[in-house]
Image (tube, rainbow, N blue to C red):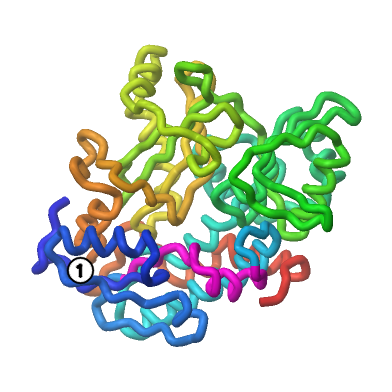
Amino acid sequence: MSPSANSTPPLAVVGNPGNRRVALFQEAVRAAGLPRARTVSWRQVLRGEAAFLPGERVRIDSPGEDAEVERLLRGVDDPARVEGSALWYTRFTSAVRDVGRAAAAAGAVLLSDPHDIAVLFDKRLCHGVMDAAGVPVPDSATSGPATAPVRDWTGVRRLMAEHRMPRAFVKLAHGSSASGVLAVETAGPGRVRATTSVERDEAGRLFNSLRVRTYRTEREVAAVVDALAPDGLHVERWLPKASVRGGRVADLRVVVIAGRATHAVVRTSRSPMTNLHLGGARGDLHEVRAAVEGAGGSWHEALAVCERAAACFPDTLCVGVDLLPATGWRRFAVGEVNAFGDLLPRLTGLPGSGAEGMDTYRAQVAAVPAKRSPAGERPAGRRPAEERRANDPAKNYRARNDRDTPAA
């Protein structure tokens, strides 16, 4: 993984100028001795002004952390609000398709596929795609494009009972960074508890908080879920996770670049949510690897599970896989796959990954030449456009559910 100015085509990045993600990518480009990547802002994209140059390799980065972009996508003035994720998804995926059309018209090449992004940002579709591919995932009552929308807490309760899930994660279908996630526990009629970072004010509005809280009555839980449901819900079994010293539960974020697991970080917490911004802490990767191998498990197989999940999205250079280790450290499941799961500053590559000494951004820059393909040939794994359209689960899902999605 060592790019050169002669072998790497010109780069462009769709992002928010000044954003830390764009800054880290530009640092990686500079460190590789390459010309600065041309930045196309999300505001330009949303105004219909995106333009690319022939031969450019185009990185699509997160539209987050820009209040104006957030307002244009979600239709809310307070970026801490939880509501509006269905509208965000409709407008964001439309914008990504616009980027794809503009790149194709210019003869540029995307490093993330619009079809893949649409699936990655719908937890129901993403779960269904992985399940169909044989990737181990938690049992789900809402997996795939054909499931009926969950409209309220009563529907969640029914699905949990039907699927024998006394404990489940209830997630916004289009959420990220634990927004709208509840870890729900039930123990008979009226006995409900939910752990979440969602805060509900006196007017019934929902806000993301940095403090994890517990709702202990069914009335409180129902009020939150009923407010989330119009944006779409995904319900999956809450798998007991392995723990590290101190009794903290643990999972891993594994970055897969060009099909290979290159970086991994352990996330630990005393709550069901291990997100670092919610009080989670980085764990010791060497300790986790020793625990896996000491239990008779295979660290190689754990990484292979992540690579199998990433292989469901063969036209996307980089994804972040949330790997859930089961109690005992011998079995693993994939919780989610993230289109923008590479924001792990200063984390260097795994031994033997080919990304040793490189952070996630430098490793992606180094992998860009490998994404090139001879004239007239498709990159490995790319399906013909007509086949992709016929088998696009995001399109099929939208066709079935247009009546339930807010207009863009």
Residue shown at 40%/69% (left/top)? 15
Stretch of the chain drawn in magenta = 58-77
Residue furthest right in the image: 189
Left or right: 158 in relation to 261: right
Give left or right: position of 364 versus 252.
left
The quarter in which the C terminus is drawn is: bottom right
Mark 1, Cα crowd under 10 Å, few <14 / some 14-19 / many 20+, is few
| Residue 156 image point, x, y percent | 80, 43
Q: Position of residue 390 (x, y in %)?
A: 55, 67
Q: In this view, does 50 lie above or below 73?
A: below
Tell me, yes or no, whether the highlighted magenta stretch contains residue 78: no
Q: Nearer the viewer, residue 141 or 267?
A: 267
- Name the amino acid type tagged 1: Pro
**Residue 70 is one of the magenta-drawn residues:** yes
Question: Element type at marker 1?
Answer: loop
| Number of dots carrying numbers | 1
Spot occupied by residue 64 in the image (x, y as percentages of width and height) = 50, 63
| 259 or 44: nearer the viewer | 44
**Residue 141 visible, this angle:** yes
Q: Is residue 134 visible?
A: no
Q: Name the residue under label 1.
A: 374
Tell me: residue 290, above or below residue 98: above
Can you tell which quarter of the image residue 371 is in? bottom left
Quadrant location of residue 353?
top left
